[in-house]
Image (cartoon, helix red, strand yellow):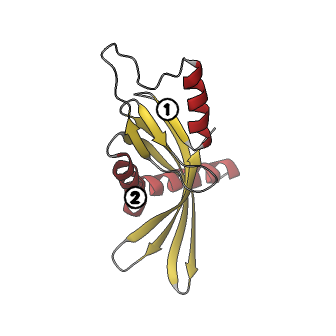
Amino acid sequence: MSALQRFSFSVCCFLLFMGCSPSLDEAKQVLQQRIASQSQGCIKLVSFAVTEVQEFQAAGVEKRRIRYAAQIEFVENGLWSRGVGSGSLNFEFSPNPRTEEGKSTYSSRAASGVAAEMIRDLQGDRLMSEGERIRILGVMTGTKSESAWRYELNENRVSD
């Protein structure tokens, strides 16, 4: 078997393991639940892919660090309070009520709207439109118990 064939076989086995592992589905559910609860259903997780898995032991307990890439979609127009700095993203969301004319109550076209939008952005808030998608990258740590893996979000950020 050539080096290329061995590499291809290893990649296929890894992808098969990643796609079938219930413990990795639990990791996806942790992120999905955080998004749903913080956004009150206004943001949904549309994709989740594990990009790297590191397994290790600490104090005799099996642990796992997972790096992932995900994509979220906004179900309605509104203000996403994602937070600032290098910590984890927040998924808090305030729906943006529309006027009868179909215009947003947040006017981003007017000069005052542009200034307000800049201030919101500095505070970590961002106006989002229905159907808009954002890619995020993150890290979770899992701890194995007798019956299952328990995952915690460590960090995540918007991918540029």
Regarding residue 95, the answer to whether it shows in the image is yes
Q: In this view, does 61 lie above or below 152?
A: below
Q: Which three-letter amino acid code belongs to the residue tagged 1?
A: Leu
Q: Which residue is located at x 47 percent, y 65 percent? A: 152
Q: Which residue is located at x 45 percent, y 40 percent? A: 72
Instruction: Report the disc number at residue 28.
Output: none
Work out whether residue 124 or residue 26 is closer to the camera in this orientation and state it. Answer: 124
Q: Which residue is located at x 43 percent, y 52 percent? A: 19
Which residue in the rendered view is the most extreme toward the right? Answer: 3
**Callout 2 crowding tier (Cα within 10 Å): few <14, some 14–19, many ≥20:** some
Q: In which quarter of the image is residue 34?
A: bottom left
Q: Is residue 74 above or below residue 101?
A: below
The local secondary structure at tag 1 comes to strand
Query: Mark 1 highlights which residue?
Result: 127
Q: How far apart are marks 2 and 1 (CA)?
A: 25 Å
Q: Which residue is located at x 39 percent, y 78 percent? A: 145
Nearer the camera: disc 2 or disc 1: 1
**Callout 1 crowding tier (Cα within 10 Å): few <14, some 14–19, many ≥20:** some
Which residue in the rendered view is the most extreme toward the front? Answer: 112
Q: Earlier in the sequence, mark 2 or mark 1?
A: 2
Query: Mark 2 highlights which residue?
Result: 30
Which residue in the rendered view is the most extreme toward the top? Answer: 101
Q: Where is residue 144 in the image (x, y as percent from the top left)?
A: 43, 75
Regarding residue 51, the answer to whether it shows in the image is no
